Image (tube, rainbow, N blue to C red):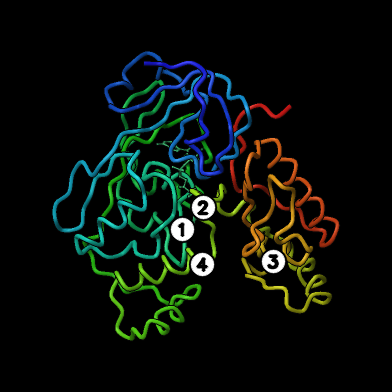
Amino acid sequence: MIQQQVDLRRFNTFGLPAVAERFLALTDEAQLTDPLFRQAPDLVLGGGSNLLLMDELPGLTVHVQLSGVTWADGKGRYRVAAGTDWNQFVRYTLEQGHSGMENLILIPGTVGASPVQNIGAYGSEVAEFITTVHAWEYGVGAVDLSPADCAFGYRDSRFKREPGRYLITAVSFDLSEPRALKLDYGAIRTELELRQIDQPTASDVAAAVTAIRRSKLPDWFFLGNSGSFFKNPVVPRPQYEALHEQYTDLPAYPIDDTSVKLPAGWLIDRAGLRGTGTPRVGTYARQALVLVNRGGATGRDVLAFSTQVQETVAARFGVQLEREVQLIGRCD
Ligand SMILES: Cc1cc2nc3c(=O)[nH]c(=O)nc-3n(C[C@H](O)[C@H](O)[C@H](O)COP(=O)(O)OP(=O)(O)OC[C@H]3O[C@@H](n4cnc5c(N)ncnc54)[C@H](O)[C@@H]3O)c2cc1C
């Protein structure tokens, strides 16, 4: 049943007030055969953890509430409904003794959104484990996409490049092959040493990643946010070299011979913006890349502040930051 004028504040991790003109909870795949789904709705909403919602969302918002592991072979192969909480699913696989996704623990959002930006953390990305993405192609019907069809890239996929073509209904994963633990990313080894663990299991790595993430990122339940607000910018090598002469401690990740990726958080921090802002919105004191709703912020407040951050960083370093989060709704 379509509801009118639904407040989405509790459906986005920024805790921003936004009213969907029309709202449909998708609880059963059979609903997709309704003529309504011959074309894309205005917004397909998962956990709302990668979105910057404006006050008014015109048209139809579909909230994906299909939930649960719908098939498993007991050997590490799973088919999981799109609305299932990602973190709960990762925990479940570990409880079943199927390792692989431990580095991806505690990423907010739903299983169905995980292929959209090919979520990743601590040296792993979800594309490594996906065998099939089950989707509804508007105007076509139910389709199964192989990893090659999904065209996964770094925080990228066909679903991101072709918005309005598919609604993901379920994702199939294969964790049946044992894989080596990935310990050389972020502070995983340091955290394991602190815990005096020298022969870690996948669950130990999951616990270490959980502790690291909790120490760096605010809990959105208490302090609304959408994780990394900006993408790490990629600049031409000569620009990086000029910057490096001036800022010798500027971290850099070479992409190829001609371009270099810079950490957006470092740039914001060194522009003097960490922990700054207004009473309603600002950068997180422990991680400048995260913008937080300090209470009562609207999408417009966050957008205005993020523009100030972009302008300050551009003026200081000549580097243009691009939003990672998706802006939804009218902002004119
Ligand atoms: C504190 C915090 C930490 C984070 N850390 C990470 C991290 O380490 N790594 C990382 O990669 N991301 C991270 N993120 C970003 C976010 O968790 C991911 O982008 C996540 O996959 C978004 O899932 P969601 O269900 O909330 O999607 P939403 O925010 O609801 O939607 C995101 C996009 O996916 C589309 N979408 C959602 N569901 C479907 C579906 N079923 N079918 C088709 N399209 C769909 C939406 O239309 C939208 O375009 C973090 C976010 C927060 C708040």
Name the quarter where the C terminus is drawn: top right
Q: In which image quadrant can residue 181 be found?
A: bottom left
Of labels 2 and 1, the one closer to you: 1
C-beta proximity under 8 Å, tags 2 and 4 = no
Q: In which image quadrant can residue 244 be found?
A: bottom right
Measure the C-alpha gap from mark 2 to mark 4: 23 Å
**Residue, disc 2:** 155
Q: Is mark 2 within 8 Å of ligand 1?
A: yes
State the image coordinates of residue 209 (x, y, percent, origin top left): 42, 68
C-beta proximity under 8 Å, tags 2 and 1 = yes
Measure the C-alpha gap from mark 3 to mark 4: 17 Å
Pick whichever of labels 2 and 1 is earlier in the sequence.
1
Rendered image: mark on residue 215: 4
Q: Secondary structure at mark 1?
A: strand
Measure the C-alpha gap from mark 2 to mark 1: 7 Å
Name the residue type under label 4. Answer: Ser
**Residue, disc 3:** 266
As drawn, 271 above or below 79:
below
C-beta proximity under 8 Å, tags 3 and 4 = no
State the image coordinates of residue 5 (x, y, percent, origin top left): 52, 18
